[in-house]
Amino acid sequence: MSRLRVAVLASGRGSNLQALIAARDAGELPIDLVLVGSDKAKAGALQLAGDAGIPTFVLDPKAFASRRDFDVELFRRLDESGADVLVLAGFMRILDGEVLKPWVGRMINIHPSLLPKYRGLHTHRRALEAGDAEHGASVHYVTAELDGGPVIAQALIGIRPGDDELQLAQRLLTFEHQLLPAVLRLIAESRLSLLPPDVVVLDGNPRNGPLQLRNGHLVD
Ligand code: GAR
């Protein structure tokens, strides 16, 4: 069987991309990384991809007349790459709901909160300010609704007394690096799909809640 062809979009340092590369290299993730794209020329993710021999591209939002024009070109590049699946790994732009439609069911995002809590930005700060006892990260199918698509799996961590935003983000990141490859592996093994509009199907069975990351594995 041919390996899943995966494209990644990232705006920042790219540690989640690095986790995918490491899992692939360790033989734990049967994928080919075919393209990494960014909206930021200086994104660390581009450097990591280049070092790993993965083709890259940058699109500068300022070079486009509108947000929609940017997204049309973005998805043209992704289509052209022949990717089966698109992973948003710290891609910090809102995508046009119409333009992304053909990718619904083939596009996942990692978000640093226990969705549906804290969509959008500053999730760690908001969890701390709310006095939450727990925080976490979610991987979800991307739909037109920002951070609103069906959640596939979550990693949950406790908030410790004295945690600040940075400590919390850093501690969570370690679990993100397990969560994202674990979900992508289910897709690569053809075990996971989206039954539109919002039902996650695992091994042929509709799920009624996210999988949980425990000891590096996804469980009920
Ligand atoms: C990660 O924490 C990811 O969950 C978050 O950006 C960070 C990227 O880190 N994504 C979002 O906030 C998306 N809304 P990385 O560049 O080191 O992978």
Image (cartoon, grey):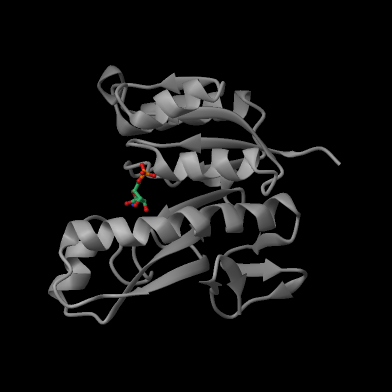
**Is residue 100 in view?**
no
Return the x and y of residue 141 as percentages of the image width and height: 53, 57
Instruction: Judge by depth and name the residue closer to the eye, 194 or 157.
Output: 157
Whether 32 is drawn above or below 199: the answer is above
For this orientation, the residue located farthest to the top is 63
Question: In this rendering, would 129 be left or right of 80?
Answer: left
Q: Is residue 49 above or below residue 198?
A: above
Residue drawn at (32%, 42%), measured in percent from left and top? 92
Identity of the residue drawn at 54% across and 70% down: 215
Is residue 8 or residue 94 the one in the foreground?
8
Total label count? 0
Pick the quarter of the image with the N terminus: top right
Image quarter (top left, top right, bottom left or bottom right) of the C terminus: bottom right
Question: What residue sits 37% from the left and 22% below the top?
Answer: 59
Q: Residue furthest right?
A: 1
Residue 213 as seen in the image, left or right of residue 137: right
Is 213 located above or below residue 27 in the figure? below
Q: What x and y, as percent, mark residue 108?
A: 52, 51
